[in-house]
């Protein structure tokens, strides 16, 4: 059976949204009731930046905004603030995605990391 490029594109977008919703569900589970000694990284943000740097066509702006507005509401953060910051960060990475493909992994990793610093 032959897949069309449009079906593959929408399947990748659906996979991204489904993975983000699954990660949000896992973060909301009360697995540990004692406070941790260190703050864990934001896996949803890291996965979004990774996916945007590697496959920018599968991460449209509307899906990033929608996912992070839902995350803001579920995690009781300021609604829309984190979503706006992530949309800006992903658009910067999207503009540099072609250049990052030729760069070695540490350069790509540092680029994504330094874009998040306030």
Image (tube, rainbow, N blue to C red):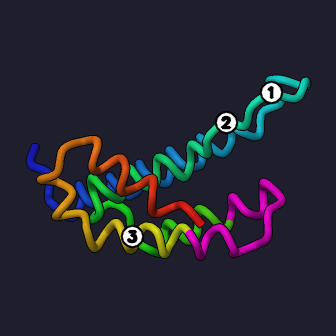
Q: Nearer the viewer, mark 3 or mark 2?
A: 2
What's the residue at 25%, 68% (across, down)?
Answer: 96
Q: Quadrant of the C terminus?
A: bottom right
Say if mark 3 contacts mark 2, CB within 8 Å.
no
Q: Secondary structure at mark 2?
A: loop
The residue beneath circle 2 is 40
Q: Nearer the viewer, residue 11 or 75?
A: 75
Q: Residue 4 falls in which quadrant of the image?
A: bottom left
What's the residue at 18%, 44% (across, down)?
Answer: 104
Q: Residues within 10 Å of mark 1 (few under 14, many from 20)?
A: few
Rounded to the nearest angstrom, the CA distance separating label 3 from label 2 is 27 Å
Where is residue 47 shown, x and y percent of the image?
46, 47
Q: Which residues are magenta?
A: 70-85
Q: Residue 28 falls in which quadrant of the image?
A: top right
Position of 103 with respect to 68 (left or right) is left
Position of 102 with respect to 117 (left or right) is left
Q: Secondary structure at mark 1?
A: loop
Q: Residues within 10 Å of mark 3 (few under 14, many from 20)?
A: some
Rounded to the nearest angstrom, the CA distance separating label 1 from label 2 is 10 Å
Q: Residues within 10 Å of mark 2 (few under 14, many from 20)?
A: few
Where is residue 15 shown, x and y percent of the image?
41, 48
Where is residue 25 shown, x and y percent of the image?
69, 41
Q: Earlier in the sequence, mark 3 or mark 1?
A: 1
The residue beneath circle 3 is 60
Where is residue 24 shown, x and y percent of the image?
66, 45
Label ID, residue 37: 1
């Amino acid at each position: 059976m032959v897949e069309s490029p449009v079906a593959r594109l929408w399947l990748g977008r659906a996979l991204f949204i489904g993975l983000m919703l699954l990660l949000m569900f896992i973060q909301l589970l009360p697995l540990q009731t004692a406070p941790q000694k260190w703050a864990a990284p934001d896996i949803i943000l890291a996965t979004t930046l990774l996916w945007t740097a590697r496959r920018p066509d599968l991460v449209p702006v509307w899906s990033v905004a929608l996912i992070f507005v839902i995350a803001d509401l579920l995690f009781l953060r300021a609604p829309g603030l984190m979503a706006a910051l992530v949309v800006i960060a992903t658009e910067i990475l999207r503009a540099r995605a072609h250049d990052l493909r030729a760069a070695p992994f540490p350069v790509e990793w540092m680029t994504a990391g330094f874009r998040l610093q306030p």
